């Protein structure tokens, strides 16, 4: 039997009726990043914020709970090992998230894991030099 471990994920609108988990779109699939290190999850959250995303909350959750959710929702998952290479958010983002649609329809419930959660698109574009500057600053936090 595999021993469950505590991992860290990013939650948007934490502790509200419209909360959702951050996913990354890979092809036509969604993937949840499960960070072994809270610090790594916080760094990733800061990078999302730098791209004008809503501020995510880093939450500790049992890895098996996330895996079960992924299996039921048809999502993939990836464990980001502690002290691994810096994971960068994708440059392109989904224009409208499922949790935004749910909020508009007002039919969401209290569960963290009910809707496909991909952060909204950044309102501004960053040049390559601006992105490189942000990356250097964030790596400096390491």
Image (spheres, helix red, strand yellow):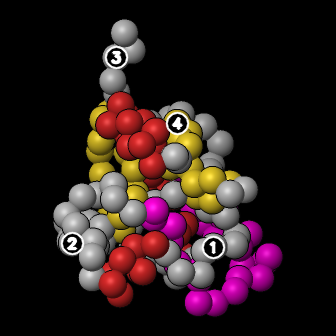
Q: Is residue 27 left or right of residue 119?
A: right
In this orientation, does residue 49 appear? no
Question: SS of the residue at dot 3?
Answer: loop
Vertical order, 137 against 104 (above or below)? above
Q: Which numbered disc, 4 or 1, marks the residue that appears first in the sequence? A: 4
Q: Which residue is mark 1?
A: 93
Q: Position of residue 132 (x, y in %)?
A: 74, 69
Q: Residue at x 53, y 81 (%)?
A: 96
- Residue 17 numbered mark, or none: 2
Q: Which numbered disc, 4 or 2, marks the residue that appears first in the sequence? A: 2
Image: magenta residue range: 116-142
Vertical order, 41 against 56 (above or below)? above
Question: SS of the residue at dot 1?
Answer: loop
Q: Which residue is mark 4?
A: 79
Which quadrant of the view contains residue 94?
A: bottom right
Q: Which numbered disc, 2 or 3, marks the residue that appears first in the sequence? A: 3
Q: Which numbered disc, 1 or 2, marks the residue that appears first in the sequence? A: 2
Residue mark closest to the camera, 2 vs 3: 2
Depth order, front residue of 78/135: 78
Is residue 120 found inside the magenta-colored segment of the image? yes
Residue mark closest to the camera, 1 vs 2: 2
Distance CA(mark 2)–CA(mark 3): 31 Å
Q: Residues within 10 Å of mark 4 (few under 14, many from 20)?
A: few
Is residue 81 found inside the magenta-colored segment of the image? no
């Amino acid at each position: 039997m595999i021993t469950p471990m505590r991992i860290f994920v990013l939650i948007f609108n934490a502790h509200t009726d419209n909360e959702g988990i951050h996913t990354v779109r890979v092809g036509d699939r969604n993937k949840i990043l499960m960070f072994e290190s809270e610090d790594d999850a916080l760094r990733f959250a800061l990078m999302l914020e730098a791209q004008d995303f809503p501020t995510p909350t880093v939450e500790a959750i049992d890895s098996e709970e996330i895996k079960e959710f992924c299996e039921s929702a048809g999502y993939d998952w990836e464990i980001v090992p502690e002290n691994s290479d810096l994971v960068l958010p994708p440059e392109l983002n989904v224009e409208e998230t499922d949790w935004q649609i749910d909020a508009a329809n007002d039919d969401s419930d209290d569960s963290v894991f009910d809707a496909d959660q991909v952060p909204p698109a950044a309102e501004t574009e960053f040049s390559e030099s601006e992105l490189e500057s942000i990356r250097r600053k964030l790596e400096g936090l390491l």
